[in-house]
Image: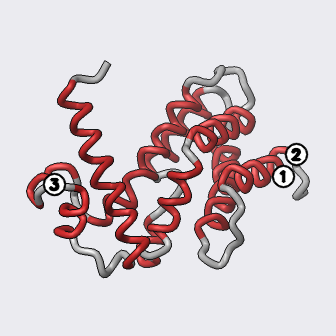
Amino acid sequence: MASLRARNRARVRHEIQDAAWRLFTEHGFAAVTTQEIASAAGVSTSTYFRHVAGKEDLLLQPMLASSADIVAAYAARPADEPVARGLAAAIRGRTAEAADTDLRRWRAAMRTAPELGSRVTLIADADRGELVRLATERGGSGLVVHLVLAAAEYAYGRWIDPAADEQSLVALIDAALDETLDGAWR
């Protein structure tokens, strides 16, 4: 169990993030200051900076955490499971765990910061490398890892696109992974 200090830190960070996403959605990323975020979260600016490196962190960090969770989920899968099936299951599991409301709120906030779009990815580079390492240790192929990740990234790109329809991330990822695993593209 996390210490009281760790729980309080997580709570304050969540309150800051919640306030930021709301303000970004209402006013646009560029128009919102760190002081406004701190005030909306009910914390001082110095407290804000103890918990958050900057505004960008509030949009980028959730994806980095999710990326690490996918690696952990894949590492916990049976070692003899085919790489494509195991990685797809890890991605699906992590995506399904994310609350749809949080995903929609994050996407709405993220869409106000198109300049950050190129920095947001479903899987961070370091985590991509770790997935390849795990797969090859298990006798699998790094190419298969990249293929499955490309399908998931394609779905993610469709979901984050402001011009896209409002399908859920889970549905888009499921469809892309199904098509990839079934080989329907061959």
Q: CA distance from mark 2 to mark 3?
A: 50 Å
For this rendering, which residue is in front, 37 or 79?
Answer: 37
Mark 2: amino acid: Asp
Label 1: which secondary element: helix
**Labelled pair 2, 1 in contact (Cβ < 8 Å):** yes
Q: Nearer the viewer, mark 2 or mark 3?
A: 3
Q: Residue at point 22% right, 35% down?
A: 8
Q: Residue at x 24, y 45 (%)?
A: 12
Please rate how many residues cluster around mark 2, counting C-alpha atoms within 10 Å: few if below 14, some from 14 to 19, many from 20. Answer: few
Q: Amino acid at mark 3?
A: Val
Label 2 sits on residue: 182
Amino acid beneath label 1: Glu
Q: Secondary structure at mark 3?
A: loop
User: What residue would you read off at disc 1?
Assistant: 179
- Residue toward you, 64 or 147: 64
Q: Earlier in the sequence, mark 1 or mark 3?
A: 3
State the image quarter where residue 40 is shown.
bottom left
